[in-house]
Image: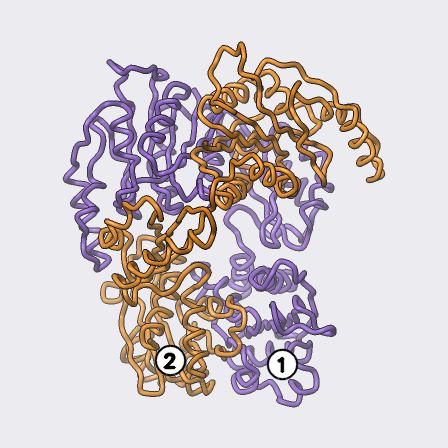
Chain colours: A purple, B orange
Amino acid sequence: MSAEILCIGTELLLGNITNGNARWLAEQLAALGVPHHRQGVVGDNRERLIQAVREAAGRCRLLITTGGLGPTPDDLTTEAMAEAFGVPLVEHPQIWAEIQARISARGRACAPSNRRQAFLPQGARVLPNPTGTAPGIIWSPDPTGLPFALQPGFTVLTFPGVPSEMQAMWAATAAPWLREAGLAAGVFASRLLRFWGVAESSLAEQMADLLALDNPTVAPYAGAGEVKLRLTARAGSTAEAQLLLAPVEAEIRSRTGAACFGADADSLASVVLEQLRQRGETLAVAESCTGGGLGAALVAVPGASEVFLGGVIAYANSVKQQQLGVPAALLESHGAVSDPVALAMAEGARRATGATWGVAVTGIAGPGGGSGAKPVGLVHIAIAGPDGSSSEAVHFSASRGRTWIQTLTVGEVLNRLRLQLR
Amino acid sequence: MSAEILCIGTELLLGNITNGNARWLAEQLAALGVPHHRQGVVGDNRERLIQAVREAAGRCRLLITTGGLGPTPDDLTTEAMAEAFGVPLVEHPQIWAEIQARISARGRACAPSNRRQAFLPQGARVLPNPTGTAPGIIWSPDPTGLPFALQPGFTVLTFPGVPSEMQAMWAATAAPWLREAGLAAGVFASRLLRFWGVAESSLAEQMADLLALDNPTVAPYAGAGEVKLRLTARAGSTAEAQLLLAPVEAEIRSRTGAACFGADADSLASVVLEQLRQRGETLAVAESCTGGGLGAALVAVPGASEVFLGGVIAYANSVKQQQLGVPAALLESHGAVSDPVALAMAEGARRATGATWGVAVTGIAGPGGGSGAKPVGLVHIAIAGPDGSSSEAVHFSASRGRTWIQTLTVGEVLNRLRLQLR
C-alpha cells in the first residue's frame, strides 16, 4: 500500500507557481500514516497526463491528483482519467443542478462550459466540493481487459488545484474515506508549537537532542518572522500518540519560556485577543507604515469585535495630527518616525476610541524614504495602557523588502503587547 | 528535446518542506526556452531513485536532479546514478582536495564521510559547486549494453538540494552549458493579464478561440476574486516573442474592456493609486469588516504615500460615531451594515482627512453576526468624491469563510473606485 501525488498544470511546469498542494497533501498523508513514495507534475497535456496516470496505476495503490478540474478546455483531468482506463464519461444531473445553483447564488450566469464539470468517468463516485463548482472523483477503475497492469485495488482521488477547495474536500471526504477503507495505517498525531523572537538556527541548536528523536519526531520550520516546531508521534491510537507528544512539548516549553506563543491554529493576534478578552479589556491601533495591516491581522480572528474597537490609519502626518492629536511640534522636532510620535499616536488611539490599550507603529518600510539616521527597516513601536506608555525602536533588515518589513512589524507589535499582557 | 526535473529527498515526501527548487528550475528552463514536460519527487531510497532515473532516461533528453549529494548515508544520488547506468564510481583527487580546503577554511574538521563526495560515476564531468562542498555532475551515460532504452543524447545534471548552492551552480555552469550545447532553443516571453469582476469560466468562453492558440499560448487562472490570463510566446529572441504577444494582448483587451485592470505586477491597489496620482488626487478609507485590510493593500504598493492619506478602522460603532461622525440615529435606524451608514463613513473619512476621495466598507464577515435580512457575506461599499457619493450592497458567498469575504471585499472596493476613476 503506497500513495502517489500527481499535480496537473502547465503553470507548474512554467514555474509560475510553487507546488504548495503537493506539500499540503504530503503532510496529510504523513499524518494519516499512509506511505507516500513518489510525486509527479505534468502539464495540461492529454497524452502525457494519460501516460503518467497509467504509470502510477502500475506502481501505487492510491493516486491523488490536483488540478485540471475546471470548466475550461485546458482542464483535462476527468476526461484523461476516463480515457486512461477506457470508460466513457457519464453525466450526473445532480452535480449539474448543484453547479447551476452555486453559480446563480453568486449572481453570475452559468456558462455552458460549466456543464463539463458534471461528467465523470463511468463507475466513479463523486468526491464532493463543498466550496467550489468542480467536484472530484473517488474511483477504482476496473482492470479487466486493460492492456496494462494496475496495482490491486488501485484507486484514484481527484481534487481541484485551488488550495482552499482541495483542503476542504480532503477534510470532509477524503481523509474519512482513507480511514474507513483501512488505508490509514496507524495514527499520527502532531502538534505545531509557534515561536516569535527567536531564530530558527538557534532554536534548532537549543533543541538538537530533541531533533534527533525518532518518535515523536521534532522538525523546525521558519516563516515570516515566526518559527515553528512540528512534533509528530506515531502510535496505535490517537490517545497513545498524544501521550508521546505531551512530555516533549513540555520539555520544549520549559526550555523556551515566553518565546513560545502558542500552538496549532493560534496566531499572535488570536493569542493577544484572548489575553484581552480574559482581562475584559479592549484594544485600538494607530498605524502608519503598516497602513492597516495590524488591524487586518486582528480582524482575521473570528470574534475580534469583542476586544478590538478599531483605530486610525495615520499614513499622512496630517492624519496623525487631526485624528490622533499628535502635536505638530513633535512631528517637526523629532520626525514622524520617532519614539515621541509613536507614543503620541498610541495615546491618541487610546484616547480617541476609549480602548484600554492603544498600540502604534510608525516606520520606514521602503524602498524609498530612508536616510543615514533613519534607514529603511527602522520602526518605532509604542504601547499605551492603563499604567502608562512606552516606545521602542526596532531595526528590521531592509534587504527583504517592503512587504516583509510590514509583515514583521505587525508580528512584532502583537508580540510586544502579548509579553506585556502576560 | 525536453527536460525533466527530479527532486530527491524524503523531507519532500513527508511534506516537511515546499519544493521551491522545482519552481526555480522550471522558471530557468522556461526563460531559456527548454521545453519541460514533467517533474518528479522521490525519497532517499536507492531502488526507487534508480527506477525513477531510468524511467526519465527513456522519456527526456535532459534530466535535472536536486538533492542527495551531501556526505551522509541517506545522500544516494551519485551512487544511484552510477548504478542506474551500470558504471563504477571513480575518485577525483582534485575534488577531495577542494572539499578539504573548503572545510578547513570554515575552521571545521573534515569528516571521512566528506570523501564520498569526491567519487563520481565513471565518465561524468564535474559540475562545480562554488559555494558548497558537494559538486554535481554533467553526464551522458553510454547506452551501449544497457537493458533499457535511453533517449538519444540523454544527459543528466545533478545539483544539491540547498537552494543557494543549486542556483549558483546553475548560473555559473549549467545555463552556459545549455546554451553552448544548443539545448536552449529560443526564448519564452510571457504576459499576465489581470481581471476583476468576471468569472474564470465566462472569460474562458469569451476567449475560446485564443485558448486554442499554439504560439502564443493563452491560459486562464483563478485566484481570490481575481482571474488571470497568461500569454506565453516562444521565438528566437525576446523581441520576436514580444511581437507575438502584442496582437493577442490587444485582442483580449478589446474583448474584455474595463474588466482587464492591469498586467504582470499590477494590482488593483497599484492601478487605483496610479489613477489618483495622475489626477493629483488623494484617498482615505473607513473600514469596518475589513479592519484595515484595504489600507494594508494600498500601502503594500511602494510610493502609496503620495496618494493615500490613511483613514479610520471603525470596527466598533463608537468609533464610527466619534472618528467619522456617523450619527447615532443612523446606526440605530438602519444598523451598522447599511447604505446610509456606509455613505456616512465614506463622507466622514473624506471630511476627517481632507482627501479627494473617501471609500468605506461595512459588512458581516462571519462566521457569527448574520441574520435573515443581513446574512454573512453582505457588505455595503460606499464611495464619496468631489461630485457626490454612492453606496451599494454586495453579497459574497458565506461558504468560503471570513478571510475570503474580507479579501474579496478589499478587491471589490478597489475595483469600484477604479471603474469610477476611469
Report crowding for label 2: few under 14, some 14 to 19, many 20 or more residues within 10 A (C-alpha). many
Chain of the residue on which disc 1 is drawn: A
Marks 2 and 1, how far apart in space? 25 Å
The answer to whether residue B15 is left or right of residue A138 is right
Q: Horizontal and vertical percent for residue A53?
A: 35, 26
The answer to whether residue A355 is left or right of residue B391 is right
Answer above or below: position of A9 versus A180.
Answer: below
Q: Horizontal and vertical percent for residue A191?
A: 55, 40
The answer to whether residue B335 is left or right of residue A225 is left
Amino acid at dot 1: Ala
* Residue position marked by numbered label 1 in the rendering: A344
Residue depicted at 59% across the width and 35% down the height: A245
Chain of the residue on which disc 2 is drawn: B
Q: Give the secondary structure at mark 1.
A: helix
Q: Mark on residue B171?
A: none
Report crowding for label 1: few under 14, some 14 to 19, many 20 or more residues within 10 A (C-alpha). many
Q: Give the secondary structure at mark 2.
A: helix
From the viewer's side, name the closer residue of A16 and B70.
A16
From the viewer's side, name the closer residue of B276 and A120.
B276
For the image, the number of numbered tags is: 2
Q: Horizontal and vertical percent for residue A13?
A: 44, 40
Q: Is residue B367 visible?
A: no
Q: Is residue A163 visible?
A: yes
Amino acid at dot 2: Met
From the viewer's side, name the closer residue of B1 and A355.
B1
On the rendered image, what quadrant is the C terminus of chain A found in? bottom right
- Do marks 2 and 1 share a chain? no
Q: Horizontal and vertical percent for residue B47?
A: 54, 17
From the viewer's side, name the closer residue of B209 and A9.
B209
On the rendered image, what quadrant is the N terminus of chain A found in? top left
* Residue position marked by numbered label 2 in the rendering: B345
Would you identify the image quadrant in which residue A351 lies? bottom right
